Structure formats: C-alpha cells, structure tokens
Amino acid sequence: MRMYDLIKKKRSGESLTREEVQFMIREYVADNIPDYQMSAFLMAVYFQGMSEEETLAMTQEVAHSGEMVDLTAIQGVTVDKHSTGGVGDKTSLIIGPIVAACGVKVAKMSGRGLGHTGGTVDKLESIPGFQTTLTRESFFDVVNKVGFSIIGQSGNLAPADKKLYALRDVTATVDSIPLIAVSVMSKKLAAGNDCILLDVKTGSGAFMKTVEDAITLAEEMVAIGENAGRKTVALITDMDIPLGRNIGNSLEVIEAVDTLKGHGAADLTEVCVDLAANMLFLGGKGSLTECKAMVHEVIDSGAAFDRLVAMVEAQGGDSAVILDTDKFAKAPYVHEVKALKSGYITWMDTESCGIVSSMLGAGRETKDSEIDYAAGLILHKKVGDFVEKGDPLATMYASREALFSEAERRYEEAIRIEDDREEEKPLVYARVTRDGIERLA
Ligand code: URA
C-alpha cells in the first residue's frame, strides 16, 4: 500500500477501506508517512468529506493508537459528557455532582484551556491542593465512592489525534466537520465510558458558528458513537453569549457552587438541567421528564452540592473554599467596566469575552504559560439587558492594574448597545439521537 495512492483516491472523492485507514494511521504514528503527505490527505478530506464507514474506521484507529481505558472496575453505568468548548462553560463542575447524586457514575477526563476557551482541569486546580492526576486505581476508587471524578486527560489517550491536530492547526484543516468528529470521538471512545452526551456549541464563541453546521457535526459524532457500540446523544446549545456570568478559573468554580446551591444564573442552570437530564436518560434512569425532576430534586435537597464537596476532598482539595467561596484567594486588583451609553445590549462577541479573560491572566497564550487562578471577569449585563450610561457592565479581576486598560478596550468593542431590544435566543436548539434530529427551537 502507498500513501500516494490513498491521497489520490481521496482527492477524487472515493472512500478509503478500513484496511487503508488502518495502514495510514499506523504508519503515520510510526513516522513512516511524512507530514507533507498527511497534510495533502487532510486537505483532500476537507474538500471531499468522508463516508460514515470511513469516519468510523478512522475514529477507531485513532482511538486505538494509545491507551483504551478500561472502566470495568467501576460499578454501574458510566456516562461521559463532552463540550465542544466555549466561554464561561463550567457545566462539567455542576453536572458531575448532579448525575452522581442521582446514581449514575461519571468518570471524566478533561482538558486544559487554550486560546479563548477555558478548561475544566484548570478550574479545578484553582481549588488549593486539588489533584487532577490520579493513578487509575485512585480514579476508579473516587468514582465508586463519590459517584464522580474529574482528572486530566492522560498523555497516552489517542496520541494519533495529538499529531493530526497539530498538523491540522497549521494546514488550515481544523474546521472540517468529519475531522473534528474523528478527533473528538477518538478521545471519547478511548476514555471507555458506556454512554456519551455531546454538548455541541454554536454561535460566536464556538467552533460551529451556525446551528446547521452544529447539527451536521452532532449527527456525525452520534453516528460514530452508536456504530462503535456507545449510547450517544447530542444537544446543540448556544454559545453566542457567554454561559452564566463568571469567566475565569476560581470565579467559575464559585459560580458552579452557586448553581448547585440553587441560585445560579438562569441560562447556566437551564443548560445544566437539560444536560444532566440527558445523561441520566442515557444511564437508564427513566424518561427525560422523570430525569429532569430527579435533577431538580438533588439540587433542592443539597445532595448534588454534597457530592462536589466529597469529590474535592477525595482528590486532596481544600473543601473549605467550596463550603465558603469567600475563602478563595482574591485578585489584588479589581476594576469596573461602565456602559458608555444607555440602551439594550444586542450583541456580545463571545470569543472576545474569553480573550479578555485570558488578557487578565486567566488563560494561556501558549501551552506552557502560567495562569492566574483568581483572574477573570464577572458579567453584570448580557444580551437582552437594559443599561443606563455609567451602569457597571462587568467587574474585572487581575494581579496587575496595568492589565485593565487593554482588556477594558477589548471588552467595550465586544459589546453592542442599541435602542431596540433583540429577540431572546434559545439556549438549546436541538437534540440529536440515532433516530434523528428533534428541533427544540
Ligand atoms: N476539539 C477537538 O478535540 N478536536 C477538534 O478537532 C476540534 C475541537
């Protein structure tokens, strides 16, 4: 077999066989296929797409390029949740405890933030002492005892994806729907869960800018999951506006605690209730309506919050900051951004809001940058809200006063204030299952 022939085949719109895909991924990982040939193949996929069988074969081959995590030591059904990434997306910290309190296990491996999006592992590491690296035995132990655990993604999970992603990043082939589907689902298959809930974000802060593209990606990922024997459902949720009010690491943990205590922002609460109910549905806990009622019950009773406290303690974290979030280390400098005119907020550039948080110190510019756990911003007004000139729009937190002026300018550019109110947007657009698309808005 020759890579040259596979590139030519894909270039003319044909599908590769499973054997051809196997050859290509194995030889690429072994450095026997050079980056320039793989780049040409990826570009051919960008223009020609891939068939369902081809996408499944490539996902499985990429997944098997590293460790396939065996979760059989965990008692009961395990359900994973994956978000395609966003700004202010702290849903994993809220949903994990809820789902665990309802009796379904969550053994989650999460990533760090890069660019404008945050990462769950960084948020958890803002809790003093919290360990995101556990041995497999300790990880299973925490899941069995507490019902959920979140750790960092192992370096050996789908290594072929790491190599392919780095190449896509520099060859303008990241935004190919089949390649994103392969990348996300290879890591999900390798992580070993029985069921997978996908939170596919759409809007200005998401990879998928339109609902229709998000649905296409969701359909491809659901097909891969189901064809690989995992029960898979996707929700298409809004990322045209940051989720909730807090952006930044400890600020997002604080908002997660508030939400678990029943007084979180309405949009964040609604999305979390829908995501958690779908995870329970996948875990066989009943109809979606029954699952939603269970979610509300464990929030109202405090059972979900107790699971968060238990998980933090089990992973070496200081639960005092969860029991009283005022105990989190505070940023030494605070700055209020005020509205420059009166009117309704009609638009927010969500990606820019994430960049502003990074500029304040909450994110990484490069893989090795240090992050400031207390930095970030709290949004007081979002799309649909009326503001008077001089009203506080947001509060910014940083370790140096000098960081505020540029961040403030960028934030002001990221917000549009106009005379007429915009129509409210839905939070959940659609639910995609193996049976089809259910439009919810
Ligand atoms: N997230 C991934 O893991 N891979 C992609 O290709 C895009 C988003």
Image: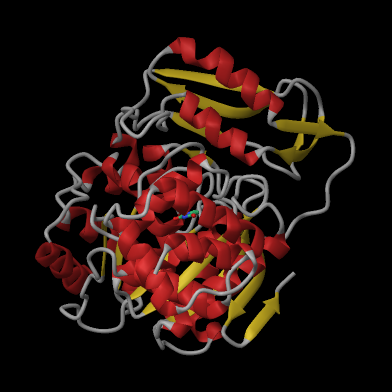
Is the N terminus in the top left, top right, bottom left or bottom right quadrant?
bottom left
Residue at point 30%, 30% (across, down) = 329
Res. 325 visible in picture:
yes
Q: Is residue 337 left or right of residue 114?
A: right
Q: Is residue 338 left or right of residue 134?
A: right
Comparing 398 with 168, the one in front is 168
Residue at point 68%, 24% (across, down) = 412
Q: Is residue 344 above or below residue 434?
A: above
Total tally of numbered discs in the picture: 0
Q: Position of residue 347 (x, y in %)?
A: 75, 40
Q: Is residue 416 above or below residue 283?
A: above
Q: Position of residue 64 (x, y in %)?
A: 29, 70
Q: Position of residue 134 (x, y in %)?
A: 15, 56
Residue at point 29%, 39% (across, down) = 126
* Picture quadrant where residue 400 is located: top left
Residue at point 66%, 71% (across, down) = 430
Is the C terminus in the top left, top right, bottom left or bottom right quadrant?
bottom right
